[in-house]
Amino acid sequence: SFYYIFSISYVYDFYDFIKDKSCMNPVFKYDEIKEITEYLENGGGNKYRIKSILYGICSQFLDAAELVNMNGKTDQLINSLVQYVQENFKDEISLKSAAKALGYDYNYLSGYLNDRLKTNFPAFLNGYRISHAEYLLLNTDKSITEIASLCGYDTIRSFNRNFVKITKTTPSEFKKGEIV
């Protein structure tokens, strides 16, 4: 993983576009990492080249991201829910445990997810888990069984079923780059 910290002035249009949004799946693969590394190792310097690279990253992020509009107090619940899932997705969690941890009524949270995100909690959780699994498959040498466990799945069968349902390919095909 790489972290690049830079001023929003380099990509202000992008910042202006996403400032009122929250990302549901913040992990993505940037295909041109070699380009950035080589440029920065050679000293960089050209601000237009840097902007070009940063906008390339922003573009790939938007292709991979699922953004949700944030507009007020109720949207803080989305942030809280996303944070709860990010911190606990490896564990056995449920809508009931999320509601309790966030201090909301189970039925309210269920309705909120359905109305606001057009999904239910298991689908939301599995989407996050599979997004993390994709990252691990592409960026580690861990076995598929290890990755399934690291992503909160008790059985490889459950992991495979959810992976195929979401990505339309098997984990092993995905890892090999045989994406349908």
Image (tube, grey):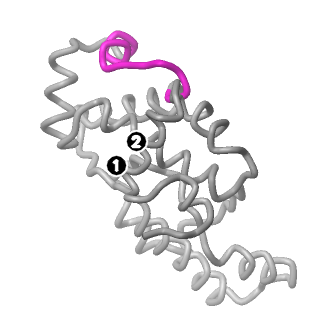
Q: Residue at x 37, y 30 (%)?
A: 81
Determine crowd level at label 1: few under 14, some 14-19, many 20+ residues with C-alpha closer than 10 A. Answer: some
Quadrant in the picture for the C terminus: bottom left
Tell me: residue 129, above or below residue 110.
below
Element type where label 2 sits in the image = helix
The part of the image, by quadrant, that contains residue 78 is top left
The three-letter amino acid code for the residue at tag 2 is Arg
Q: Position of residue 71 (x, y in %)?
A: 23, 45
Residue that mark 2 sits on: 161
Give residue 64's position: percent from left, percent from top: 43, 63
Name the residue that disc number 1 marks: 165
The residue lying toward the viewer, choosing from 123 and 110, is 123
In-image side of 44 versus 158 (left or right): right
Q: Which residues are magenta?
A: 89-101
The picture places residue 53, in percent across and down from the top left corner, at 61, 81
Q: Are marks 1 and 2 in contact (CB under 8 Å)?
A: yes
